[in-house]
Structure formats: C-alpha cells, structure tokens
Image: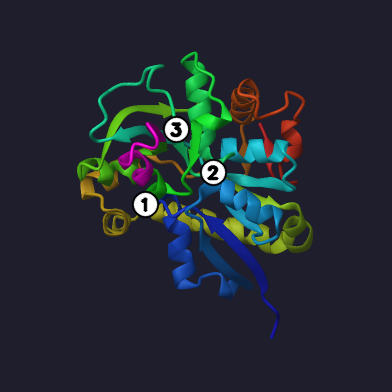
Amino acid sequence: MKTKTQLRVGGVPEHFNLPWQWAAERDIFSAHGIDLSWTMYAGGTGAMTQALQSDALDVAILLTEGFVAAANDGLKAKIAKVYIDTPLVWGIYTAADAPFDKLSKQHSSPVAISRFGSGSHLMSMIHARERGITLKENQFNVVNSLYGGLESLKRHDSKLFYWEKFMTRPHVKSGELKMIGEFSAPWSSFLIIVSDDALKKKRQAIEHLLQIMNAECIAFKQENHSAIQLRKKFDMSIPEARQWLKHTQWNYNFEVEHASLNNAKQALTIVGKCDEQLKIERLCAPWLKLI
C-alpha cells in the first residue's frame, strides 16, 4: 500500500473554514493519498504563524495582513493561493455598559488583541492611524481569543476590541457587547500559506490539496444545506447565514492581485510592521500567478 502524505493544516474556528471542517470530517483526502489533520487555532493568525515557524503546521489559512507582517519578520513560508477574495468586515466592540457609543481619541485604548501580530492587533493599529492616532505597545492587552476579548471588555480592562463581525454578532444580540463601528481593509481577507519546508518536501500533495479544496469551496458556496450548517455551528439565523454566504467569495483560481498584497504591505509599513523593501513577488509559491 502506498504511503499517504501527512499534511497538518490549521485555521481559525470561524465560518470561512467550514469547507475545511466538512472535508476533514468526511475524510475525502485519504482517497487522494493525503493524511490530513485539521487543527483549530482560537489564537488566530499570530498563533498559526508561530506554528508554521516551529514546524507544527505545514499549511495555514491566515489573514493577509498577518502573513505579510510575519513574512517581513522572517517567516519561511509562501502564499499557496488566495482563500477568500472578499475583504474581512471587522466589528469594533466595547462593553455593553461602556459610557460611549462611537469611536473617539479619548476612548482609543486600551485595545484587546488576541496576540501581537494578529489581525486584531494589526487592524486596530491601521484603523487608529487612519483616525490620526498612534497606538503604542503598552496600550494593548493580549487576550488570546474572542472569548478572552469578551471578558476583557466586560471587566473594563480594555475599551475596544476588533473581531470578525459575524462571529461576534451573537454576543451583541445577547447584550454582552456593544458594536460601535466597522472597518474593512482594501485587500483580500484570507490566504492559504504553506511553509517553505513543506513546499520543498510535499509539493505534489499540497497542489493536490488545493485542487480538492477548490471543489469543496465551490460546493459549499452553492449548496442550500450550507446555510443550515452555519446556523447550527455559529448561532446564526438562516437569513443571516444566507447573507453571509452571499457576500463571501472564495477564490477558485491560482492568481493573486499585486495591488491587494501591496495595499496590505503599505498599510503595515505606515504602522511600522513592514519594510518598504519587502518584495511581494518573493512571497508567492511557484504555481501562483501574480497579476
């Protein structure tokens, strides 16, 4: 019997990755010679970049800005393909009983973040800079996850918290949190990232994996049953699930827009998290076309 190639894949426990969970639960990879293990990372992009760096993961689904920042810091990994084309909508949250209902310089910090280098960290910095505010390291509270952020706001240890809008919506409905704004960056939200070591040793299996997941994501987008699964797993109503599916676009090709990556790079450069000299083209796997 031919030995299967082991691929260790990680992603956040959010709506976007339900196609991966479905595929892993059905074990569709085995028939294609892939022994896939799927791991949820509540700590998000910051936790997964560490896992890639320490060889605990071969492949990870990372936020675009998080990967660009990590690559600038020396992460040995490449973009295998774009995963989600549409930008991520970040909700901006505070405690339900906070004495303010909109963003201001007065209420700009402390900010709860999952980790330094995470999306919640980078987006809060980028958005603050757009509003004329420079946040320093001592103005952030590391809370590790969405639930850590909820608790930090409830205790009033933090004033603000940035997290994906739909994932956080149930906590607004329940009265735990108050949403006081939204922010979307002008670049694709998620990338599929492969470590340089895995690319070198497991390239054929990784390319096959990407083709399999293209088909899975197309099916997920089209099937009526997907809205029901979203409702069950993420406490959404069917109309909310359908709205989310309508506005979320998975990527099905092997192209990446230079402008999208460059937008992320420039925003990170402004907040001191990326070097202007970083070469975008060096971040792409050999099969990926930069357009």
Q: Residue at x 71, y 41 (%)?
A: 284
Q: Which residue is mark 2?
A: 115
Q: Of the residues shown, which amino acid type is indicated by label 1?
A: Gln
* Position of residue 216 in the picture relative to residue 197 (left or right): left
Instruction: In the rendered structure, find residue 73 and report the number of the disc placed on it.
Output: none
Nearer the observer, 59 or 143: 143
Percent across and percent down for residue 127 are 48, 23
The stretch of residues the image draws in magenta is 150-161
The part of the image, by quadrant, that contains residue 249 is top left
Q: Do labels 2 and 3 touch, CB within 8 Å?
A: no
Instruction: In the rendered structure, find residue 222 and report the number of the disc placed on it.
Output: 1
Q: Secondary structure at mark 3?
A: strand
Nearer the observer: mark 1 or 3; the answer is 3
Nearer the observer, 43 or 284: 43
Q: Of the residues shown, which amino acid type is indicated by label 2?
A: Arg
Q: Residue at x 72, y 36 (%)?
A: 72
Q: Secondary structure at mark 1?
A: helix
Q: Which residue is mark 3?
A: 111
Q: Do labels 1 and 2 touch, CB within 8 Å?
A: no
